[in-house]
Amino acid sequence: MQKRIRLFLALIPLLFYLELAAQKTQQKSQLPALIDRELFFGDPEIINAQLSPDGSYIAFIKPYKGTRNIWVKKREEPFTAGKPMTADTTRPINAYAWSRDGKNLLYIQDKGGNENFQLYAVQPSQAPAAGQALPPTRALTNVPNARVMIHHMSRSEPNIVYIGLNDRDKAWHDLYRLDITTGEKTLVRQNPDRITGWTFDWNDKLRLATRSAPDGSTEILRVDDQSMKSIYSATVFETSFPIGFHKDNKRFYLRTDAGNRNLQQLVLFDPMTMKEELVETDPKNQVDVGQVRISEVTHEPIFISYQDDKMRRYWKDQSYEKNFSPIEKKYADRMVFPGSATLDEQYWMVHIVSDVNPEEVYLLDRKTQQLTFQYRPRPKLPVKDLAPMQAIRYKSSDGLEIPAYLTLPKNSTGKNLPLIVVPHGGPWARDMWGYNSYHQFLANRGYAVLSPNFRGSTGFGKKFLNEGNNQWGQKMQDDITWGVKHLIAQGVVDPKRVGIMGVSYGGYATLAGLAFTPDLYAAGVSIVGPSNLITLLNTIPPYWESIRKMFAHRMGDASTPQGKEQLMRQSPLNSADKIKAPLLVVQGANDPRVNKAESDQIVVALRTRGFPVEYLVAPDEGHGFARPVNNMAMLAAAEKFLAKHLGGRYQESMSPAVATRLKEITVDVKTVALSSPSTAEK
């Protein structure tokens, strides 16, 4: 009898394992079919359609010879009738704008991710040169080793744009008046005063400047003919900036949480009397004021939105509410976003988005109330197989409530799942409800996906933002860790199959998670993530001088013994010997924000102790991968890596171009050498 009991007890672990394996097999069999990663991350067919000012044309982004470029068509024509306007073959164009008169299309572009953006123009009506298929593209700011900022596009002189250039001083941009037609630049204001932005009124007169003071505070200055006067200030721990002038062209709208406010409010401020009038704060007292859309016709707000668990919008113009309310009711389970509009605001591009639908784009005629379908960026993506995203809340280590988003694999039991935590970058940013390609991709592979808005995230008020001060890798990391614990306690997540994957600060959180909570994670993927906070702060780009002091206050001050010790303690590099989980590191060679040395250091540290680490470096990328072939290669590697260590599904196939590129960017870690002696402080 005792022999039988011992045999039964010996079989219990095996029975448990077989039951667990059966559960995993059942979960996988219930999942929708594997969706090709190209459908998630490959080039969209059409994106970013924008109406010309007079409504005669629609410009849009579409691949041309394998790279995203700008196309144009007549408004009534199908998109198949569109013609390419640009022919960039090395780097996708994603953002552009019509000039005020609709004669030119303007866009900025850098080289290989170095963020030295230059301004270009193309005139759709111009005939191509002899032997060329496309109209010529003109470089309006061909200034080596400098970057352009667009401050204002003139209404009264539609061929004039006001730009900032840091060719004189890498840290600060001087203000220029640029003639789009001739390319002539005229200096308007040299910038010896730490100016970070300029605001023009409805008559194109320069009226305001924002300034970063040496102590990290922000000032708003009234710009007079011969001088500037400080009229408003916010501390380094507050947020305040103008968003446009009131219809009286005297007062301006200001977003601010300065003083005893917690949430950012919308106020009207008079730059002469310095009197302030509250316009609106969140009616539910939950989040900061969000988008404020001001009409170019009436010069009054059309709507004010708030990013809560989901977006909330409050219409301020009854005529617009009458136009858009029927659309919102028709698509009540989605979010409706008014996009570009004609100069008279008769025609609007309308973008309709949800968590399980990347986008549908329509053209609205406000006079006839006709809504006409235009395109879907990813029409081949099987939206019926995508997984809903839910907003959740949980308590962190000190009881602070953390808002987060959770996506569970469609058709799964919702229990004992592998988990991928995807922390957002910034870190002074936030995740929002809606379509998230990483969530959908990973959920399709069988993972639960968690995106926490850890303390230090924006949008939830000043107090929540400032709770993250000096807490990199500490309470900010706790907010992520306790999210994992919350899901484990609920039975949603298998504690032995937890991974973490992120970009920028999300890459740092990945390294910190593996280094500071080594028993929590079974795998990590760090994409352009800093490993050493001392070297990170020592190498930030010159044009970030305006926020250098903010970094010192919010991250830690390396110039003080206490701050230096804190930053060393919070650097995953200095705890690399504690890492237990497999790590994949991804880096762009030209990254000006998180230098390649950040990834080299952690790779060398792990290699030195004989710990396996995988490394991808794209020579033609910066802070994140823009070229689809690089992105696809990285995701193919990450997908296989996560499947190996966490048991999710993965797609083995890839195109020959992606397979070739993956081989090219895969680094033999034995060959990695630090370019100079490591400045890591041990």
Image: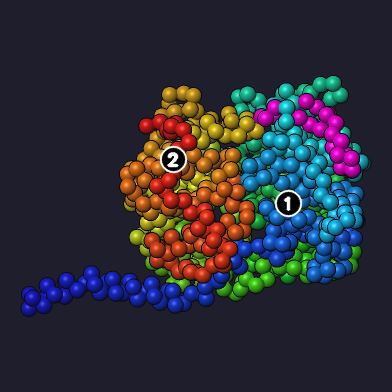
Report if the CB atoms under discs 1 and 2 are less than 8 Å apart: no
* Depicted 504 relative to depicted 327: above or below: above
Identify the image quadrant of residue 153.
top right
Tell me the kind of residue under disc 2. Answer: Ala
Residue at position x 34%, y 60% from top?
496
Residue ranking furthest to the right:
156
Residue 32 shows up from this direction: yes
- The range drawn in magenta is 169-190
The x, y position of residue 264, in whole percent, is: 65, 41
Amino acid bearing label 1: Ala
Residue labelled with disc 2? 673
Q: Which mark is residue 95?
A: 1
Residue 119: where, in percent of width, then height? 77, 43
Magenta stretch holds residue 186? yes
Q: Residue drawn 77% across and 39% down? A: 142
Secondary structure predominantly adopted by residues drawn in magenta: strand
